[in-house]
């Protein structure tokens, strides 16, 4: 069983969450986890102005995904930072290159799941995940979120990301906050949950 974790991360928050998602999926026996990034669409010049060049270099060891790897996976977990309450353009551009998969129905019946991050607590995490689901449904995918059996979702003793739609982290207005243990546990839970459901479907 192959679980593909595919993401875009500008400053590293989604990158950290993606590692936790992969850790969770790997806990399920028989799961091969593949981690990939989507291609960057911004020039180094622009990335430098956005203060993201160093972070991009540190993530460069993660290979770039090609669309055939989506077809090869049994489940795909997408990680994406919020841009104005929607997915980032890098992910949108990558998804817009999957017409070949759509026309052949290559992703129909596969599990799809999404996690996210935003600068602010109410800056569009849920809208980013839910609007991402539309594309997955057009591909005929079966959507899996983050159930309330992840108890950390209901805690009120600290600020935390995470919703029934998927794991998330709050990066702070300057990207100064890093995923908390609760948010990383949500990401691990989501990865594990996707792998368990996929293995049940395949048996
Ligand atoms: C163009 C742009 C638009 C953004 N829009 C939002 C937004 O609507 N709400 C929000 O809370 N954060 C917004 N952010 C902040 C990003 O979501 C944040 O930098 C990101 O989640 C950090 O994750 P990363 O380090 O993996 O890229 C925006 C950032 C950029 C560059």
Image (cartoon, rainbow, N blue to C red):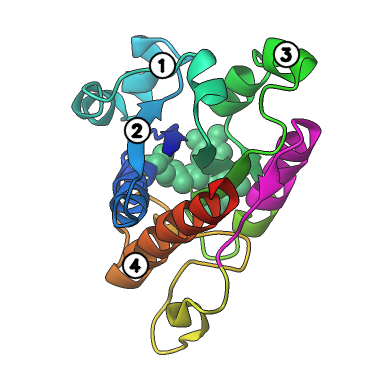
Whether label 4 touches label 1, CB < 8 Å: no
Q: Earlier in the sequence, mark 2 or mark 3?
A: 2
Of helix, strand and loop, which one carries label 3?
A: helix
Of helix, strand and loop, which one carries label 2?
A: strand
Name the residue carrying label 3: 99
Name the residue carrying label 1: 46
Work out which quarter of the rendered image holds the N terminus and state it: top left
Name the residue carrying label 4: 185
Label 4: how many residues lie within 10 Å, few (<14), some (14-19) or many (20+)? many
Q: Residue at x 45, y 33 (%)?
A: 6
Q: Residue at x 47, y 13 (%)?
A: 66
Q: Residue at x 41, y 59 (%)?
A: 192
Name the foreground residue: 17 vs 193: 193
Q: Which residues lie in the magenta part?
A: 128-146
Name the foreground residue: 50 vs 116: 116
Q: CA distance from mark 4 to mark 2?
A: 18 Å
Q: Earlier in the sequence, mark 4 or mark 3?
A: 3
Name the foreground residue: 1 vs 83: 1
Which label is found at residue 35?
Answer: 2
């Amino acid at each position: 069983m192959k679980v593909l974790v595919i993401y875009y991360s500008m400053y590293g928050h989604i990158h950290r969450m993606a590692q936790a998602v992969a850790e969770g999926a790997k806990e399920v026996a028989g799961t091969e986890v593949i981690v990939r990034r989507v291609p960057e669409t911004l020039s180094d010049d622009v990335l430098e102005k956005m203060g993201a060049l160093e972070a991009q270099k540190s993530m460069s060891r993660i290979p770039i995904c090609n669309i055939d790897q989506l077809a090869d996976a049994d489940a795909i977990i997408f990680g994406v930072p919020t841009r104005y309450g929607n997915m980032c353009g890098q992910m949108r551009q990558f998804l817009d290159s999957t017409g070949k998969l759509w026309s052949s129905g290559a992703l129909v019946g596969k599990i799809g799941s999404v996690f996210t991050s935003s600068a602010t607590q109410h800056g569009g995490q849920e809208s980013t995940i839910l609007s991402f689901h539309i594309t997955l449904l057009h591909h005929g995918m079966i959507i899996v979120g983050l159930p309330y059996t992840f108890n950390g979702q209901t805690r009120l003793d600290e600020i935390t990301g995470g919703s029934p739609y998927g794991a998330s982290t709050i990066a702070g207005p300057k990207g100064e906050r890093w995923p908390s243990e609760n948010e990383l546990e949500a990401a691990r839970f989501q990865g594990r949950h996707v792998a368990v459901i996929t293995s049940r479907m395949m048996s």
